[in-house]
Amino acid sequence: MTLRAVILAVILSLAAIFWMHQASLVQAPGLIYAPVYLLSVPPVPAIFCLLLLVALVPLTRRLRGGPFTKKELLFVFMVLVIAIPPVTFGVLEMLVPWITAPVYFAAPDNNYMLLADAMPQWFYPHDYEVIRTMYEGSDNGRVPWGPWLYPLGMWTLFMTLFVFTGMCLVTLFRKQWVENERLRYPLLFIPLSIVEKQAPGSRAPFFRNPLVWIAMGIVFIHHVLNVAHSYNPAVMALMDRSYWASQVFTEYPWAPYGGYLGFFHRPQVIGLAYFVPLDILFSGWFFYLMQPTLIVLSNIFGISAAPGFPFRSEQVTGGYFAMVFIIFWIGRHEIGKIIRHALGSVATGQGEPMDDSDEPLPHRFAVFGTVAGFVGLLIWSHVLHVPVAYSFVFFFLLMSVPLVYSRIRAEAGIPTMWGTPPSPLDSMMYAIGTRPLVHGPNLGKFAVLSTFAWMARGYFGPQIGYHAENEKLADDAEINPRIIPPVIMITFVLACIVSFYFILTDYYRFGATALYGGTTMGGYNVRCAVTQWTRSSGAVELPSGPMTPQVIGMVGGALLTFALVIMRWAWLRVPFHPIGYITCASYGYCLWWSFFVTWLIKGVVHRLGGARLYRQLMPFFLGLAFGDLLAGGISWIIMAILGPDILGGYMVQFG
């Protein structure tokens, strides 16, 4: 970690945060879902900055210390992937409306204000004019920072505690995933290909391989035709979502297929799906198509299914819950040694013989950091009058998301921010009902849990997947692993501060309801907040008991996940994989078609040329993924310079 690498990382992080903020919040061309479309994995600005640095390497040979090294370039990239997510829709763009919506949208026909009054004092500024001008824009465009400093400071501390706990947790599994299971971390192929002298599967550098340029050319032609189609529908183009099967499946009992079968054409997904194992690809599209099939079967046999059947989100919740136990069971020997070493070093000063000098965190720090962080979250919630039992279940489910999601990224590299279960609050309401949560004169615990629900609705938890990838990247680049945790934490805190500044500045300048929405309800971030508070308001108005169908869905998802794992242990050639199931069962609408196409392609490649042909084609599919990210960045630059409507309302989709 050289001084110039740190300075460069700071400068580029500020530029990337501002770029992402402008693209998703200010320059978005009138689409309420625009911020979601811009959430690529990895972030486009990070790839763009890395590409810029690589292009400038020949010009830096006369710098003191020589040209930028591979370690310096990857260090900057590791900082960028941590610095960019907080400013996005998935984190702080959603948090600010979430904590203020109950006040601004309170009306006589809802219980918003009742819930807002039950919140702790530090959750939001207790001045209606401060909140009103945030949504509608202030006369002078200035931000009243005084009332905001305390709430923002407390939220930053809380988020830092959660991120710290998640970082310690995934660090415990670094050796198990990297050395014992030898997971490939496919998403790292892109940054490594950019800086390495050789691309995966090729002896030639990445940008000198003709397959890379052919793939990038195909991607750019795809997007150019899409832009032309946006201006003139007579131009033939695939678009990103060109066809829904609802035009075919219109009759009973086949109509459910029409609402499920959407054909998304995303070059990035096809490119990175090439590195996903065949069984995960097959399981992804198979279990997604299984959902409407269950509805069709219930229609054929005249079974009166409960509303919401087959409860896709609940299945994913149960699957994630099961995967937590599976991950710990698979890594039980390594985790056991780490815990014994940590406890022994505390008790005797020695512990079980292990060398943790090459670990990002000493074993003692990782173990006690995980426990202390989780206990800290429970204490924090208890101070806010949330019973410990509720807090434990809520944060256990919430913390399982980054762990399982990090494992999915490490093994399969699926480039999506979705595919995670809904809020733990939903699971709790299904299991015990809403009556225990709203019972009594004090709604404080329900208001607090309803507010914490934003952590699962966006991209806050899954971003911890970048921490696990950074540890692997440091290992591959031979960067001192001990610098990664402090860099991650410092970067996250500073990114939150800068992001709060940018977000609130434009909220008060333009009005939160006017940005990427244009209506009184605002964009997607505001609508998500209002949706949650509407549900919470309804729970206060009409408390309910446990919801048996949803609970059955969660239990069924957990049992199916366990069954898939047991099948794989008993029969190695079983084509079903639990990761494909829990990733695509709910949000597979934007993945299943790409998975199906790539599954067919890989099957043909393996049969025709085996492993050799598979390796030879790796640069082509990396070129598809890189070209899609590059096209997305170029489109943002064009819209920023020439206006948001210059591309006819079309934007490269990643959400």
Image: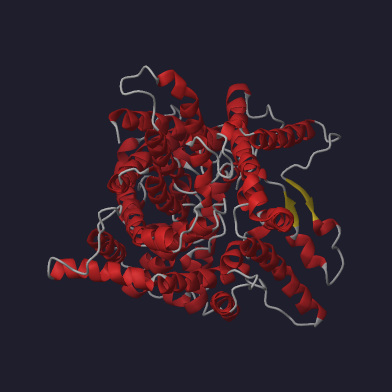
Is residue 138 visible in the rendered image? The answer is no
- As drawn, the residue found furthest toward the left would be 348
Q: Quadrant where the N terminus lies?
A: top left
* Quarter of the view holding residue 11: top left
Residue 19: percent from left, percent from top: 49, 32
Instruction: Report the side of 367 relative to 50 (left or right).
Output: left
What residue is drawn where x is 43% and y is 65%? 400
* Quarter of the view holding residue 213: top right
What residue is drawn where x is 30% and y is 38%? 146
Q: How many marks?
A: 0
**How is the rendered protein coloured?**
secondary structure
Q: Nearer the viewer, residue 585 or 221?
A: 221
Q: Nearer the viewer, residue 321 or 274?
A: 274
Is the residue 35 above or below the residue 386 in the image? above
Is the residue 175 above or below the residue 394 in the image? above
Residue 180: percent from left, percent from top: 41, 63
Q: Nearer the viewer, residue 583 or 253?
A: 583
Residue 271: percent from left, percent from top: 64, 46
Instruction: Report the side of 384 relative to 21 (left or right).
Output: left
Instruction: Report the side of 212 relative to 544 (left or right).
Output: right
Residue 207: percent from left, percent from top: 58, 31
Q: Nearer the viewer, residue 382 or 424?
A: 424
* Quarter of the view holding residue 298: bottom right
Is residue 125 visible in the rendered image? The answer is yes
Instruction: Report the side of 554 relative to 156 (left or right).
Output: right
What residue is drawn where x is 59% and y is 68%? 577
Is the residue 78 above or below the residue 418 in the image? above
